Image (cartoon, rainbow, N blue to C red):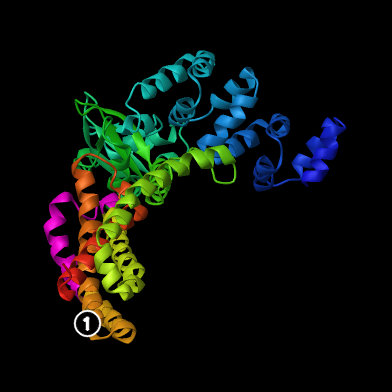
Amino acid sequence: MHSEFKELLDKRDWEGLRVLIREMKPSEIEDLYFELDGRDFVILFRLLEKDLALEIFESFSVEHQVEIIKLMEEADTIDLLEPLDPDDCARIFEELPAKITKRLLNGLSPERRKYVNLLLGYPEGSAGRYMTPRYVSAHKYQNAGEVLTGLHASPLRADEMPMIFVIDRERKYSGYVMLGDLIKTEPLTPLESIVKGEDIFIYTTDPKNRAVEIISEYDIPSLAVLDAEKRLVGAVTFDDVMDVAEEEATDDFHKMGTVGLMRTGLKDANVRLLYAKRVPWLLTLVFINIFSGAAIASFEDTIQAVVALVIFLPLLIDSGGNAGSQSATLVVRSLATGDVKNKDWFYLIGREMLVAATIGITMGAAAAGLGIYRGGLELGVVVAVTMIIVIFAGCLIGTTLPFLLTALKMDPATASAPLITSIADIVGVVIYFRIATWYYGIA
């Protein structure tokens, strides 16, 4: 399909291209974005019917949408942006240069421009940036029949009104009613008698990931967004929070791997970008690990006295680092999902120490056998005791660091596996050679 499209494009056979496109599925047209040069794809894009072009454009990530817009004529771009939900427009404008954003905003209809500007006025990363004006609201003084009649006249699609937000005459939020419950209710029943979820909402200035937590916790398709005076100003939908959850998960994975935040996919990233995102942390870890080397050098006399100690050094420090990484991964994920809070630290530390004790004793027994085999009973004892202590230390570091970063208002995902491992390495080296120096009685 790619070669056929290129052949028709080179011949400037526009009618042939239109026929070819009509035979293609939307998913096949999307795939061409990753196979063609950007400008060639824009030519294809302009040949699409308006509805199909919009459907395909909405299926792309914001980063890819921005790349397409940068290659299009301004008039074509405005035609593409005008039908989009304002929150989707706002996310695209966030990624565009200010001059382009200003021109495109001026080209939108006054009503659309007003709402997009409103969204862009909220702090980046806030729920206000992600809310949409496409929701259904009703006054709590109405009855069920009146609300249902109003739904028939609503310009919203059926999938955009799974729930009705209930307000008073001052637009202050009173709760919500699910569409299914409304349909099953007698027409003369007052709406305020079936409303629920009065305390289920989010403020415009709240972090966007709070919306993910609330929608996930209450299993609802949409969430009311209120201003400081509890007036209903918008809604965050399930689709919106799925986008947020994907962004957060990607961000956390990058941080756990000590990779800087990337605004593009791996396939589209060039060598320069990948280098810039990966090398800073690797260089940082190089300097952190200098301390491991310094710790080893400070125990030169111990190493010379018992050379066999060196054999077990990688085993011991890697075990501590791996145990710490496991603990950190579990804690970071639980903090991200809201499963645990900072106040749960004491409980988790207590439980983690019990787990570390059982793991340490098990691994210590295995290490003791190897130590006895390679260097006798004394080496076996040193290796076993060290293994138990470094497992304790690794689990303690891995459990504590995410909580500490959260308390400091930093992302706990920064407590990444390589960072935990590096810290555990330094601690493990000191513990190992301290125990060996004391046990062997080396001055």
Q: Is 274 above or below relative to 219?
A: above
Q: Which stretch did the figure color magenta?
A: 335-358
Q: Which residue is mark 1?
A: 378
Main secondary-structure element of the magenta-colored stretch:
helix
Q: Looking at the image, can residue 418 be seen?
A: yes
Residue 30 within the segment the image draws in magenta: no
User: Residue at (33%, 70%) from the top-left corner?
Assistant: 310
Looking at the picture, tell me which residue is in the foreground, 38 or 86.
38
Is 343 part of what is drawn in magenta?
yes
Using the image as rendered, state which of residue 166 and residue 268 is in the foreground. Answer: 268
Q: Secondary structure at mark 1?
A: helix
Q: Position of residue 388 (x, y in %)?
A: 21, 73
As drawn, is 343 to the left or to the right of 2? left
Amino acid under disc 1: Glu
The percent coordinates of residue 331 (x first, y second) are 26, 57
Q: Quadrant of residue 422?
A: bottom left
